[in-house]
Image (cartoon, rainbow, N blue to C red):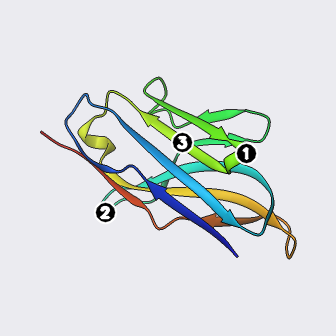
């Protein structure tokens, strides 16, 4: 089994910053990609940012230039540095990882989510 545990959410004023972390644990053989998704009230879950083994990164257009995704492969941890936050960034942020274990090839795993609220 693989577990993803997020941390770092909270309440922040517009223009502020937050850093999210997500640590993967369990019987992991490899992680091909790690990323962040978000879901705002009444909206569908959307991709925020993803980082692929090797360092390639992709961002949603709405966060490009404000958010930075990074990864510590030794710790199986992904980070999301969020700067210049806007009220429209308010959402539950979910960590995602595409993981291979000794029991199965690549599968998607999800964290339980962490709430980010941007409000004055």
The residue drawn where x is 54% and y is 53% is: 22
The mark found on residue 74 in the picture is: 1
The mark found on residue 89 in the picture is: none
Q: How packed is label 3: few (under 14 Cα within 10 Å), some, or many (20 or more)? A: many
Q: Which residue is mark 3?
A: 79
The quarter of the picture where residue 85 lies is top left
Q: Which residue is mark 2?
A: 42
Picture coordinates of residue 41, whole percent (x, y)? 29, 61
Q: Nearer the viewer, mark 3 or mark 2?
A: 3
Q: Is residue 119 left or right of residue 18?
A: left
Counting residues from the start of the chain, the first of labels 1 and 3 encountered is 1
> Which quarter of the image is occupied by the N terminus?
bottom right
Q: Is residue 53 left or right of residue 108?
A: right
Counting residues from the start of the chain, the first of labels 3 and 2 encountered is 2
Distance from the alpha carbon under mark 3 to that under mark 2: 26 Å
The residue drawn where x is 64% and y is 40% is: 71
Q: Nearer the viewer, mark 1 or mark 2?
A: 1
- For the residue pair 25 and 120, the one nearer the viewer reads as 25
Counting residues from the start of the chain, the first of labels 1 and 2 encountered is 2
Residue 115 vertical placement versus 47 (above, below): below
What secondary structure is marked by label 2?
A: loop
Distance from the alpha carbon under mark 1 to that under mark 2: 37 Å
- The number of numbered badges drawn on the structure is 3
């Amino acid at each position: 089994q693989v577990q993803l545990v997020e941390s770092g959410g909270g309440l922040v004023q517009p223009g502020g910053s937050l850093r999210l972390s997500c640590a993967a644990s369990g019987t992991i053989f490899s992680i091909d990609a790690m990323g962040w998704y978000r879901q705002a009230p009444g909206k569908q879950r959307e991709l925020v940012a993803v980082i692929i083994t090797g360092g390639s990164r992709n961002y949603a257009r709405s966060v490009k230039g404000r958010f930075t995704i990074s990864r510590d492969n030794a710790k199986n941890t992904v980070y999301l540095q969020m700067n210049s936050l806007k009220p429209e960034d308010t959402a539950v942020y979910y960590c995602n990882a595409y993981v291979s274990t000794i029991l199965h090839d690549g599968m998607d795993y999800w964290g339980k989510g962490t709430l980010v609220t941007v409000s004055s």
